Image (spheres, rainbow, N blue to C red):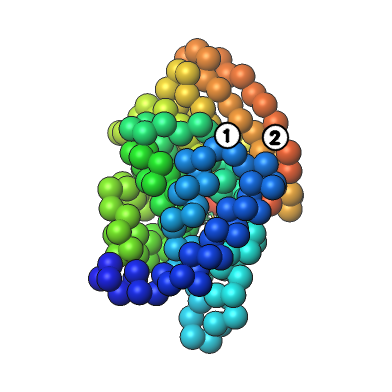
Amino acid sequence: MLKAVSKEDDYLYQGKRKRLVEILKTKGINDSKVLEAISKIPRHLFFDASASRPALLDHAYSDKALPIGAGQTISQPYTVAFQTEMLNIQPGEKVLEIGTGCGYQTAVLLEMGAKVFSIERQKLLFDKTKLFLPYIGYTGARLVFGDGYKGLPRHAPFDKIIVTAAAPYIPNDLLEQLKTGGLMIIPLGEGEVQEMVLLKKTGPTQFDKKTLGSFRFVPLLPNKAGQ
Ligand code: SAH
């Protein structure tokens, strides 16, 4: 299986990834471990480039969000890199991701040595990504079908939490499941554009909050797992 994939990941794509990494550097990303992860992960295999839409493949390494099926998108590489960099991921840390989608962000976190738990509420995407990530060699993530607003109390506390869909408010369960000293990054807002918020938990109910500029995400949808 891995052989088949590596055949598809030819020099052309590796070259395109190198250029993408250069673009991300010029946009201000400088965590070398984030850039290294992005230079390794075959992004062109993650999204919905069916035979009917081969043109999408040409955009796999442009700095754009792209469709992944079920009306969802793979985040723009800059956004993935930015959120990951802000979390200052260290090997062995327990990281909770809300919104697995196609698993690209999950793969970035795995490349960085994190213990990843990721929740997705769309059954179609969940089933697809659960098969796909191991297929291209990314084993070890705990993928959960469920509601990201609730987090994963059984596996809490987490060193870091990354929310990859736009939330109308900061879910209380996620605040509780963050370790003291831990960081959470979450795009906040209900409009087309959201504010990126970085929270540091400084005590059981104390948080430092920083806002980090405007981004665009699909919405974090309410408790309707499966639809
Ligand atoms: N991390 C993904 C981003 C996918 S887009 C990537 O790397 O590409 C955001 C994802 O959040 C979508 O797949 C969407 O279905 C999911 N989502 C939306 N609301 C959710 C919720 N309440 N719980 C879990 N996942 C949710």
Q: Which mark is residue 112?
A: none
Q: Which residue is mark 2?
A: 212
Q: Is residue 227 visible?
A: no
Lower position in the chain sequence, tag 1 or tag 2: 1
Residue 221 lies, with reference to residue 31, above or below; the image says below
**Taking 198 as reference, is 37 left or right?**
left
Q: In the rendered view, does 160 fall on the left or right side of 220?
A: left
Estimate the x, y position of residue 69 in percent, counting from the top left. Answer: 51, 70
Q: Amino acid at mark 1?
A: Met
Vertical position of residue 137 compared to residue 156: above or below: below
Label 1 secondary element: helix
Q: Position of residue 139 (x, y in %)?
A: 28, 53
Q: In the image, is residue 222 above or below residue 62?
A: above
x, y percentage for residue 46? 46, 65
Q: Helix, strand or loop at disc 2?
A: strand
User: Residue 115's quadrant in the figure?
Assistant: top left
* Contact flag, marks 1 and 2 (Cβ < 8 Å): yes
In this view, the mark in front (1 or 2): 1
Query: Where does label 1 land, which residue?
Result: 86
User: Which one is nearer the viewer's eye here, 218 or 105?
Assistant: 105
The quarter of the rendered structure image containing the N terminus is bottom left
Three-letter amino acid code at disc 2?
Leu
Give the total of numbered labels: 2
Residue 6 occupies quadrant: bottom left
Q: Position of residue 103 (x, y in %)?
A: 43, 56
